[in-house]
Amino acid sequence: MPENPQRAGAVLIDGKGIADETIAKLGRAVATLEVPPLLVVVMVGKQAPSLSYIKRKEAAAAECGIRTRLLQMDEDTEQAALLQAIASLNDDEDVDGIIVQLPLPPHLDANAATKKVSPLKDVDGFLPANVGSIALHGFEPAFVPCTPKGCLDLIKSVGIPLRGKEAVMVGASNIVGTQHL
């Protein structure tokens, strides 16, 4: 029976192996630092999926020697209090990175919260300063969004050249799958 033409170019990528390699490499780099970086995750409310996601982030960070702290805020936190908390983290020299865990409760403006994070602490890489630096040659972003970076790293790991290829992206975030017309 002939090979399925739809799968002729398929390549199996060992994502777990690549993740383990990446964590080990990052751990070696962090071990050379006098003080390990501190990542603060800001979470408003207690949504189970977000808590599970944060626990995975904390575990991966711990494997690399990165310190983490969860700033858990009440579900009824007001916008001004959230923005003030983020501003305080921006000003805290011990804090190297900030993630505002989304989604936020409906009464809060997620765009205002993410915009409040300093571009130098924008671990998600969501801010225009970081996204723009990626888009323009010769500029180095402080942080790169992890989903597209991870996808590119996976593709590069198997030596697939990207130039001239077509891709389909499915998603609806500002980083993955958005098309501005």
Image (cartoon, rainbow, N blue to C red):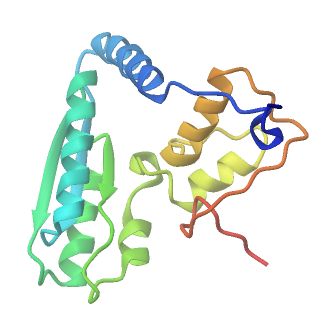
Q: For this view, does 131 lie left or right of residue 37?
A: right
Reply above or below: 27 against 169: above
Tell me the residue at 59%/31% (across/down).
154
Q: Residue 90: x percent and y percent?
A: 30, 54
Q: Residue 118: x percent and y percent?
A: 41, 56
The single residue placed furthest to the front in the displayed view is: 1
Tell me the residue at 70%/41% (across/down).
139
Reply above or below: 18 against 82: above
The single residue placed furthest to the right in the displayed view is: 164
Frontmost residue, 90 versus 78: 78
The single residue placed furthest to the bottom in the displayed view is: 107
Tell me the residue at 83%/49% (across/down).
166
Q: For this view, does 151 lie left or right of residue 103?
A: right
- The quadrant in which residue 153 appears is top right
Reply above or below: 174 against 81: above
Frontmost residue, 74 versus 55: 55
Q: Residue 176: x percent and y percent?
A: 59, 59
